Image: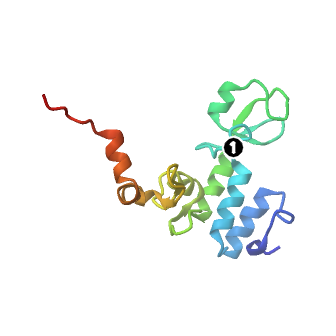
Amino acid sequence: MDLLDFDDENIPQQPQRVLNNCQEKNIKNKKKLTDYLISEVQCIICLQVPDQLYNTQCCQQYICIQCNNKNLKCACEKDYQIFNNKCAQKILDYIICECQNEKCNFQSSFLKVIKHQNSCEFQMHSCEECKQNYFEKDIINHLLTNHKELILKKHTKKIQKD
């Protein structure tokens, strides 16, 4: 299977095979790879990618330590124990992925890309006031260009003369 062209219907079910294919074929579309790996290793409760990969014993899904501390039952409704999946962690360290933000060219190991995306300057935001989209790095410019009066009104106080 050529991983450059995978879609929801033909994504392989075995993550190990996917990771091996990724290394062997030097995948060009790293944004799709990042997206796929996120779906494979995200926590089944909060849907975030955990820093450490813990599997549930019952259904072999990933769960973050925070959700594990809050829940007594797995998402599959069974009691469970977790184990640190160091093998998956090591494999992910060798897979080079790319930040999913449109204009960003950051590439690194999968978990480093996930951490990077949380603070990437190319994260897209939508302004609550004008609904215009802008990058994280452009927030100050957007506010000053489009909402200077609103900022001044909200954050300044008139001084009354006696």
Q: In the displayed image of the protein, which residue is found farthest to the front?
A: 162
Comparing 114 with 14, the one in front is 114
Q: Amino acid at mark 1?
A: Leu
Tell me if 32 is positioned left or right of 130 in this view.
right
Tell me if 115 is positioned left or right of 33 in this view.
left
Residue at image mark 1: 47
What residue lies at 72% left-to-right and 59% top-to-bottom? 36
Image quadrant where residue 162 sits: top left
What residue lies at 74% left-to-right and 52% top-to-bottom? 40
Q: Is residue 158 above or below residue 11?
A: above
Residue 23 horizontal/vertical position (percent): 67, 69
Q: Is residue 162 above or below residue 132?
A: above
Helix, strand or loop for disc 1: loop
| Label tally | 1
Residue 4 horizontal/vertical position (percent): 73, 74
Image quadrant where residue 153 sits: top left
Image quadrant where residue 33 sits: bottom right
Residue 79 horizontal/vertical position (percent): 82, 26
Query: Coloured how?
Result: rainbow
What residue lies at 62% left-to-right and 63% top-to-bottom? 95
Comparing 133 with 22, the one in front is 133
Quadrant housing the N terminus: bottom right
Comparing 57 with 110, the one in front is 110
Residue 142 horizontal/vertical position (percent): 41, 59
For label 1, count other residues whose C-alpha is less than 10 Å away and answer few (under 14), some (14-19) or many (20+): some
Q: Is residue 102 above or below residue 161?
A: below
